[in-house]
Image (cartoon, rainbow, N blue to C red):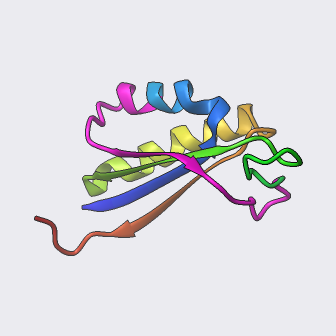
């Protein structure tokens, strides 16, 4: 099993929901307000007057064979919407209850 955290500009929420739906990923936790700055030239997303945009994040646990496909979809969305920004991070789940 793998944990995948997807962090994205809130403007992409419907598109990320669509990806999860298409891949039949039904279990996730949503963090609707995430502050931060992207490492690849991203502008701050702080929800302030100066930096009003916000990010969201989803955390999902998927089977190992689903990871590459999910990352492919995320990468494709990023290429189509580079100005908004989306990243996915993966780590191993050694145990789960």
Q: Residue at x 75, y 41 (%)?
A: 53
User: Is residue 58 on the magenta stretch?
Assistant: no
- Give the quarter of the figure containing the N terminus: bottom left
| Above or below, comparing residue 24 to residue 64 in the picture | above
| Residue 79 point in image, percent of width and height | 72, 38
Furthest toward the bottom, the residue is 94
User: Is residue 31 on the magenta stretch?
Assistant: yes
- Asked whether 88 or 63 is in front, the reply is 88
Residue 81, quarter of the rendered image: top right
Q: Is residue 2 left or right of residue 56?
A: left
| Residue 30 point in image, percent of width and height | 41, 44
Q: Residue at x 81, y 39 (%)?
A: 83
Furthest toward the left, the residue is 97
Furthest toward the right, the residue is 50
Part of the protein shown in magenta: 19-42
Q: Residue at x 36, y 26 (%)?
A: 21
| Residue 88 point in image, percent of width and height | 54, 54
Number of numbered tags placed on the structure image: 0
Residue 80, quarter of the rendered image: top right
Q: Is residue 60 left or right of residue 74?
A: left
Residue 8, quarter of the rendered image: top right
- Give the quarter of the figure containing the C terminus: bottom left
Furthest toward the front, the residue is 49
Q: Residue at x 89, y 48 (%)?
A: 50
| Residue 59 point in image, percent of width and height | 39, 52
- Asked whether 85 or 33 is in front, the reply is 33
- Asked whether 17 or 32 is in front, the reply is 32
């Amino acid at each position: 099993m793998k944990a995948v955290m997807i962090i994205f500009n809130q403007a992409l929420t419907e598109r990320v929901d669509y990806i999860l739906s298409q891949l039949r990923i039904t279990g996730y936790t949503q963090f609707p307000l995430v502050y931060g700055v992207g490492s690849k030239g991203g502008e701050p997303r702080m929800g302030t007057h100066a930096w009003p945009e916000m990010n969201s994040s989803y955390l999902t646990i998927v089977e190992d064979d689903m990871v590459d496909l999910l990352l492919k979809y995320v990468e494709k969305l990023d290429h189509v919407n580079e100005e908004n920004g989306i990243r996915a991070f993966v780590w191993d789940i050694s145990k789960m209850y």
